[in-house]
Amino acid sequence: MEETWRWFGPDDSVTLENVKQAGATGIVTALDHIPTGEAWPLEDILERKALIESYDLEWSVVESVPLHNDIKTRSGDFERHIANYCTSLENLGKAGIKRVCYNFMPVVDWTRTNLDYELPNQSNALRFDMSDFVVYDVHILQRPGAEESYSQEMLERAERRFGEMSEREKAGLEANIIAGLPGGEGSYDRAGIAEAIAEFSALGTEGLRANLIAFLKDILPTAEKAGVRMAIHPDDPPFSLFGLPRVVSTADDARALINQAPSPSNCLTMCAGSYGARADNDLVAMIREFGPHIEFVHLRNIKREADGSFFESEHLDGDNDIVGIINALLDEEARRRGSDSEFGRIAMRPDHGHTLGDERGRADVRPGYSFGGRMKGLAELRGVIHALTMTRG
Ligand code: DNO
């Protein structure tokens, strides 16, 4: 497996030198200075690639080439945005960058309610708390009809919780949910998010899925020609937020998207933390079923609670069977060794990590993306990969 590391570009406080020290060989990054919906110029891609290569690292995966909301709703200026998207893929192909991660989440990219959830050992983790989310949706945002999305019991809990929260806590919760997390797309204010939700709410699940398939059919011929594989990231969390549809949350969703737009470039990102936040997703079975389409893996663990809440646990201690997941990925790599595919090795990155030691409370440390926490995760995962590889002979 290829060990990669998410790097947020030249402004990242975790430097390319640090990545070398952590021992990863591949970089996962994006051109965040290009506004969503515009084409990525070849020059900018080559400049970023040269910088990465000057550290003897490889730009392995683009995460992400984001999709403009107009593409997701298939309205407004979507045709121009799709044409720009194709130009970006052509330019990435020319630069020799072959894997692109993207997502099709409506309105909000990955979402957490708490960015410094304290663990018993005093490190900080990311958490999604269902009752806090309901507090935001029902009492702060006051989305019309929000109550219909939740059970009576959950509404009562949220009401109690809202009554106990200080103004500062409410503002913090709102910022965590709508201001955008590292690498996420879009940052909203309250009026902006209400408007975006209204835009998506008429679509329904099959409408959103149809827009995803239509987008794939528009771009896959270009991706194939450019030699680029499109690895869709699942919904995080993998269930409806703000009453909106989600179409990349389950094995059925992944199967539909692969079957409805057949192409070697139509691929998946196996994000263990996202798919794994649902107890009904069997990740090992999914890797066995979708193996040939998996080009990128986020290895992360979570502990789930009955109401849908979860927090990001130690990489090897949680509800995900990380050893089983890695084993299934190694089986897929072994299968690929029999073919002459240039995609023989699957790119993995340690996804998120706890904030440890003197990185705690530092403003330049991105939630989930501390150096120490990810390095610890990578070291543990590397140990598993190594041990399983050795026992296979
Ligand atoms: C969170 C990430 C997401 C993801 C994008 C993919 O840590 O996994 O930001 O990169 O949603 O498009």
Image (cartoon, rainbow, N blue to C red):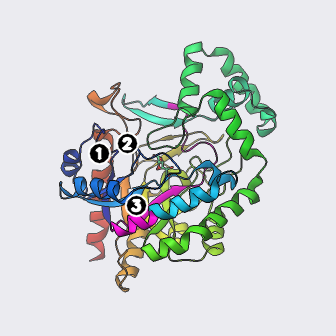
Residue 211 in picture, x, y percent from top left: 68, 60
The answer to whether residue 298 is magenta is no
- Mark 1 vs mark 3, foreground winner is 1
Q: Which residue is mark 2?
A: 353
Q: Which mark is residue 365?
A: none
Neighbor class of circle 2 (other Cα within 10 Å; few <14, some 14-19, many 20+) is many
Q: Which residue is mark 1?
A: 376
* Disc nearer the start of the sequence (3/2): 3
Q: Classify residue 285 by image quadrant.
A: bottom right
Residue flagged by tag 3: what amino acid is it?
A: Val
* Disc nearer the start of the sequence (2/1): 2
Q: Separation of disc 3 and disc 2 at Cα?
A: 18 Å
Residue flagged by tag 1: what amino acid is it?
A: Lys
Residue 273 in picture, x, y percent from top left: 49, 51
Residue 282 lies, with reference to residue 199, above or below; the image says: below
Residue 195 in picture, x, y percent from top left: 70, 36
User: Which residue is located at x 31 percent, y 33 percent?
Assistant: 356
Q: Which residue is mark 3?
A: 323
